[in-house]
Image (tube, rainbow, N blue to C red):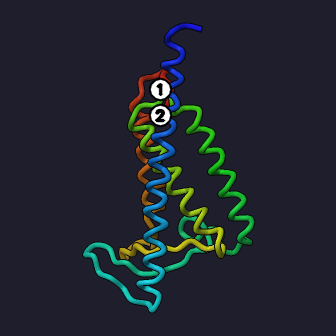
Amino acid sequence: MTTREPAKTIGAVRARAVVIGLAMLLAAVDLGLKVWVSGALAGGETIDLGPVQLRLGFNSGVAFGLGADLPAGVVLSVTGLIIVALAVFAWRVTPTATLPARLALAALLAGAGANLVDRTADGMVIDYLRTGWFPTFNMADVFITIGAAALVLVSLGKRQGEDPA
């Protein structure tokens, strides 16, 4: 064992702790908003925020309602497996990933995890952000989209032969 190995281990632990902590914080933001919106807009009210309105909606499918006709258990199982795969990937690459890649992974895990937690109660996800021209969505969806886009951009920015994360 060299003297550098403990420092690498501590760095890996810190990097993973930051990704997990940020993912939990972002997931809590989305879940908290879902709880608030469920109570505040239960009567069908809409809050106009300019380009976006807060309006309560429910989605039993995944993105754009795909899979809405499938049994909730199937959607939960498949989503859970995807999240486990994402978490294993994040766990493995985080120690050597750049900060932007770590932030992207945290956002992806947060959004996916928050929607999974929300879906476990009744097989549906609470949506609350409406633009009028796009399907209603939630902050978890925003986190997933931004995280995925950022991870793609980070990967494209790497020089050939480098680790993608």
- Is residue 65 positioned above or below 111 on the image? below
Asked whether the beta carbons under mark 2 and mark 1 sit within 8 Å of each other, the answer is yes
Asked which secondary structure carries label 2, the reply is: helix
Q: Which class describes the residues within 10 Å of circle 1: few (<14), some (14-19), or many (20+)?
A: some
Q: Which class describes the residues within 10 Å of circle 2: few (<14), some (14-19), or many (20+)?
A: many
Which three-letter amino acid code belongs to the residue tagged 2? Ala
- Quarter of the image for residue 128 reads bottom left
Quarter placement of the N terminus: top right
Q: Which mark is residue 15?
A: 2
The Cα–Cα distance between marks 2 and 1, rounded to whole angstroms, is 6 Å
* Residue at image coords 65%, 76%: 122
Asked which secondary structure carries label 1, the reply is: helix
Given the current orientation, which residue lies at the most extreme top position? 2
* Residue at image coords 45%, 40%: 18
**Quick one: 30 or 159, which is closer to the camera?**
30
In x, y percent, where is residue 76? 69, 63
- Is residue 85 positioned above or below 10 on the image? below
- Quarter of the image for residue 121 reads bottom right
* Residue at image coords 43%, 76%: 36
In x, y percent, where is residue 102? 45, 38
Which three-letter amino acid code belongs to the residue tagged 1? Gly
Q: Which mark is residue 126?
A: none
- Is residue 59 positioned above or below 18 on the image? below
- Is residue 4 positioned above or below 92 on the image? above
In x, y percent, where is residue 150? 41, 44
Q: Which mark is residue 11?
A: 1
